[in-house]
Each structure stands twice: as structure tokens, then as C-alpha cells.
Amino acid sequence: MLKITKAANRGVIIKLSGRMGAENLGELEKLISAEADGRRIILDLKDLKLVDQGAVNFLRRCEADNITLKNCPAYIREWITGGRTEGPTNSGRGEHGLGKCSSFGKSK
């Protein structure tokens, strides 16, 4: 299950936690579109534990659209930048757990 929390000040911070899959992307796209009034959008991924390939592709598109990915787990960053062509997998289910990967912030 994906938990989404939002805070707004000069920009909009959307915190994602838990499991993010293709079934969550429509809701996230609506939320981001609703905030697309010129304010900076930041997706905080610190508490994101599990993703599937659709989520990785979505995050790649977000970053290409100048949405900042903050506290992006290292394995997700690697897939976004194309460092791993096979993408997330876990027993063939198309998803991957965070495990002991470290996180780092990214700002534009």
C-alpha cells in the first residue's frame, strides 16, 4: 500500500511511503497535475520501500519534467539513470524491496 502525504509552502512536497506500483500512478498523476501552477514539486521518497517497473518509469518521467526526487533510494536512482537494464525484480514479480540500500537527496 502506498501512503501519500502532501505539504505546501513555496513549493509542494509529496511524501511517498510504503509500496508504489502501477496501480498508484493515476492518483499521483492527478495530484501532480493539480499542483502544476508554477510551484516547484518535490517527491520525497525517503520512506518508499517497494517499487515496480511502472513506478520506476513514472519517476523517470517526473524527473524529466523537472520534478525533484528527494531522498531517492540508491537502487531506484540506479534504475532511473539506466544503470540497470533489467529493472526491478523480486522472484519474477516485477518489484523490488529497499533492503539495506542507502538514500541520498537530489535537488535541482
Image: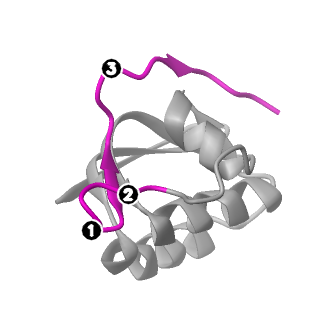
Provide the residue designation for mark 1. Answer: 93
The amino acid at mark 1 is: Arg
Asked where in the image residue 98 lies, by quadrant, the reply is top left
Q: Position of residue 76 (x, y in %)?
A: 53, 42
Q: Position of residue 22 (x, y in %)?
A: 39, 76
The residue that appears at 67% across and 37% down in the rendered structure is: 10
Which mark's residue is nearer the viewer, 1 or 3?
Answer: 1
The amino acid at mark 2 is: Thr
Which mark's residue is nearer the viewer, 3 or 2?
Answer: 2
Cα–Cα span, label 2 and label 1: 6 Å
Provide the residue designation for mark 3. Answer: 100
Q: Position of residue 64 (x, y in %)?
A: 81, 59
In the image, which residues are magenta?
Answer: 88-108
Provide the residue designation for mark 2. Answer: 89
**43 relative to 27, above or below:** above
The residue that appears at 38% across and 57% down in the rendered structure is: 89
Cα–Cα span, label 3 and label 2: 16 Å
Relative to 24, 12 lies left or right = right
Contact (Cβ within 8 Å) of mark 2 with mark 1: yes
Q: Upstream in the sequence, badge 3 or badge 2?
A: 2
Residue 97 counted in the magenta span: yes
